[in-house]
Image: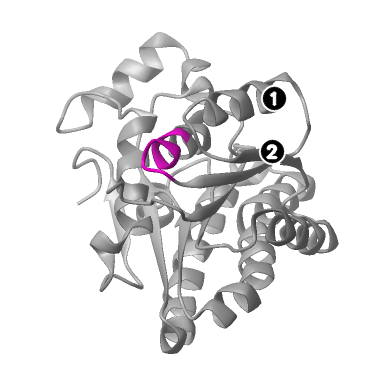
Amino acid sequence: MKLLEGKTAIITGASRGIGKAIALCFAQEGCNIAFTDLFEDDNMKNTEAEITALGVKAKGYASNAANFAETQQVVSNIANDFGKIDVLVNNAGITKDGALKRMSEEQWDAVIAVNLKSIFNFTKAVQPVMWKQGKGSIINMSSVVGVSGNANQINYSSSKAGIIGFTKSAAKEFGVRNIRCNAIAPGFIITEMTHQLPEEVRKAWEATIPLRRGGEPEEVAKTALFLASDLSSYVSGQVINVCGAMNT
């Protein structure tokens, strides 16, 4: 029996990176996948094809996670298309880094809207479905910088810290209906975004990590799999760092 056999998951921002790794990992365990991203582009189509090839139902939806009305509509469409929603992975996120003295209001607002407001939007939209089902697992993607902070990432750190507060509060609020809510705080994960950093910067980061390497998206995905499955049936309101002991 596969860990997520017959379940349906929504994963936001899943056309690439960590979100895509989670979608593929879940699909390998029998989960049907509804995923969202900002645009219906080649990345979305290719990801949909890759997931479908694993023998599950998959569909990509173009939606702005930071937009409340769009989120309500896309979740309604997913519920109609798939019939139920067992798991929500709030993964959509952006960075607009810079020192506070040079940070614009637009940089602040954009990161808070995409990273934090999207969590509110999607969780609020799926709550009635999970509430009626009497079960569900919500997984929010935070970051180690939301736990410990980081210079030149005040907007990003604030958004990721806010996710932790949201997660702990939602876990207390939703537990009465057997809906669990947890957060994952990845550290330095090797993705397209980190590949854009100069090699010396990447090496400097890796030198600060006790495991002496960056993490792989698949390693974050395996943690999400644990939280989505019944293996974590009594785990709620927690933040799991996936960081190679970078943040302890």
Q: Is residue 173 above or below residue 124?
A: below
Residue assigned mark 2? 60
**Magenta stretch, main secondary structure class:** helix
User: Label 1 is placed on what type of residue?
Assistant: Lys
Is 45 placed left or right of 160 in the picture? right
Whether tag 1 and tag 2 are in contact, CB under 8 A, the answer is: yes
Image point (69%, 69%), residue name: 125
Cα–Cα span, label 1 and label 2? 7 Å
Sequence order check, earlier mark of 1 and 2: 1
User: Label 2 is placed on what type of residue?
Assistant: Gly
The magenta span reads 24-30
Return the x and y of residue 116 as percentages of the image width and height: 62, 59
Image point (21%, 37%), residue name: 244
Image point (38%, 51%), residue name: 4
**Residue 79 is covered by the magenta coloring:** no
Q: Residues within 10 Å of mark 1 (few under 14, many from 20)?
A: some
Residue assigned mark 1? 45
Is 134 placed left or right of 36 in the picture? left
Q: Is residue 30 above or below residue 174?
A: above
| Res. 80 image quadrant | bottom right
Return the x and y of residue 89 as percentages of the image width and height: 51, 53
**Residue 28 is covered by the magenta coloring:** yes
Residue most extreme to the right: 69
Which of these two is toward me, 145 or 174?
174
Is 188 placed left or right of 21 in the picture? left
Task: Identify the element where label 2 is drawn.
Answer: strand
Residue most extreme to the bottom: 176
| Res. 233 image quadrant | bottom left
Q: Is residue 197 above or below residue 26?
A: above
Q: Is residue 139 above or below residue 96?
A: below
Image point (23%, 40%), residue name: 246
Residue most extreme to the top: 199
